[in-house]
Image (cartoon, rainbow, N blue to C red):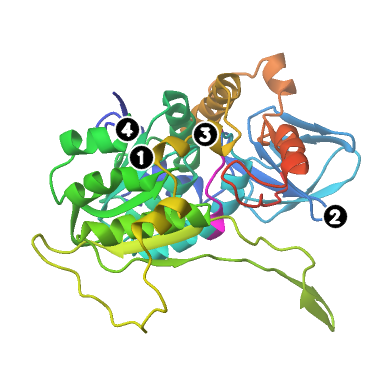
Amino acid sequence: MRSVSTNPESAPTGPADEQGAPIGVHMRKGPLRPGQRVQLTDRKGKPSTITLQRGGEWHTHQGVLRHDTMIGQPEGIVVANDAGHEYQVLRPLLNDFVLSMPRGATVVYPKDSAQIVQVADVFPGAHVIEAGVGSGALSLSLLRAVGDHGTVHSYERREDFAEIARGNVEAFFGQPHPGWKVLVGDMQEQVPHQESAGAADRVVLDMLAPWECLDAVRHVLAPGGVWVSYVATVTQLSRLAEAIRASGAFTEPEAHETMLRTWHLDGLAVRPDHRMVAHTGFLLSARRLADDQTPLQLKKREKQSEVTTEDMQAWLPEDAAWDEETLKRRTVTGRKARKAAAHSQKLAEAARGADDPAPSQEPSQDTVQDTVQDTVQDAAQDTADTAETGRGPRGGAVEQEET
């Protein structure tokens, strides 16, 4: 197992951090600086995200926009390129960052991340265990929620995914987060050795078979702590709920999904938009009971018939069936992951220099021509896969995004 962690003593600090402000504030406030990301929106409402650099240029079929016209300016300005096309300039919000950042695995979308933080009641100063880091989208929301004095320990099986997540987190905060540690390995194997019993306030899982981690969650979660799992299918939801009930260590599990619908606003023409973000996954939550306690059996209406073990086995297959090949999940190739990791590390390097308002050196000709446009590298492939299957790699519908 390899640990990819942050040392608070060696982490660089921005101007805001030196004044005692929360980590990452210098990336969110003040004039625009080199290394920061900005979102440019044209008159058609199409956003594009770029990373600012001195002497840099953003080339499109509509002309060239020079980065220096934005550096040092407040966000919210309107700038024009050399052909006169205007763009509105704003820093991207967290949900914008997530949808445009480099990725290996499919991200937990903002609507689900927000619900996870709410359902789990993640609070400042909390110690959170996360498993299934992917590209780091959920890690960003958890780190924001725990604040400067909280900690998030993230477990990820694939080292290349851990590198992508580390780059994305550093790019967002402008520096390594001192409360975050990424551990490469299986959670169910590593948690008993890495974490003290009852050390975690919250546990958040995003994986194919979360019931395999039940013993690890029972070990690390403090009495009263909240366990939230993100699953994509009804069979996963049912199996996990029955495993939690059978353990006798948690309260009655609760499940829900979130559907997000935007509205069209144009004078008196006010109506729902024709498209919406519907099912992406289910959230199942339960709370840890104190040791040697038996959960209360909730009163329910009498059932017409009892569910037998044979019924459950027919509905929920053996563990051998819960693998990516059997479920025909689209896997992420090593080449794609390495490409995303290199991209995220490049963004992180640029963001770490965003606290220096003065140019360190004259940009090279290659640097001037490189626009560093932060678009999803595999968007075309994802679109093709979605058009062919209609489903995302998690099994849920794919959210449409613009970069």
Please state, as top left, top right, bottom left or bottom right, where the C terminus lies in the image.
top right
- Relative placement, left or right, of 85 versus 238 is right
Residue for badge 2: 44
Q: Report the disc number at residue 177.
A: 1
Crowd rating for badge 3 (residues with CA inside 10 Å; few <14, some 14–19, many 20+): few
Q: Looking at the image, which residue is at 57% across and 46% down?
A: 98
* Alpha-carbon span between mark 3 and mark 2: 40 Å
Q: Which segment did they paint magenta?
A: 104-111
Left or right relative to 293: residue 217: right
**In the image, which is nearer the foreground, mark 4 or mark 3?**
3
- Please determine whether, in this image, residue 206 is positioned above or below residue 264: above
Question: Which residue is found at the position 30% from the left and 37% from the top?
Answer: 187
**Residue situated in front as seen by the camera: 76 or 119:** 119
Q: Which mark is residue 324?
A: 3
Q: Is residue 396 above or below residue 288?
A: above
Tell me, yes or no, whether the two marked residues, 2 and 1, touch with CB atoms within 8 Å: no
Circles 3 and 2 in contact, beta carbons < 8 Å: no
Q: Is residue 107 magenta?
A: yes
N-terminal of the pair, mark 1 or mark 4, is: 1
Disc 1, SS: loop
User: Which one is nearer the viewer's eye here, 96 or 289?
Assistant: 289
Label 4, on which residue?
186
Q: Is residue 124 above or below residue 342?
A: below
Q: What is the C-alpha distance between the residues marked 4 and 2?
A: 46 Å
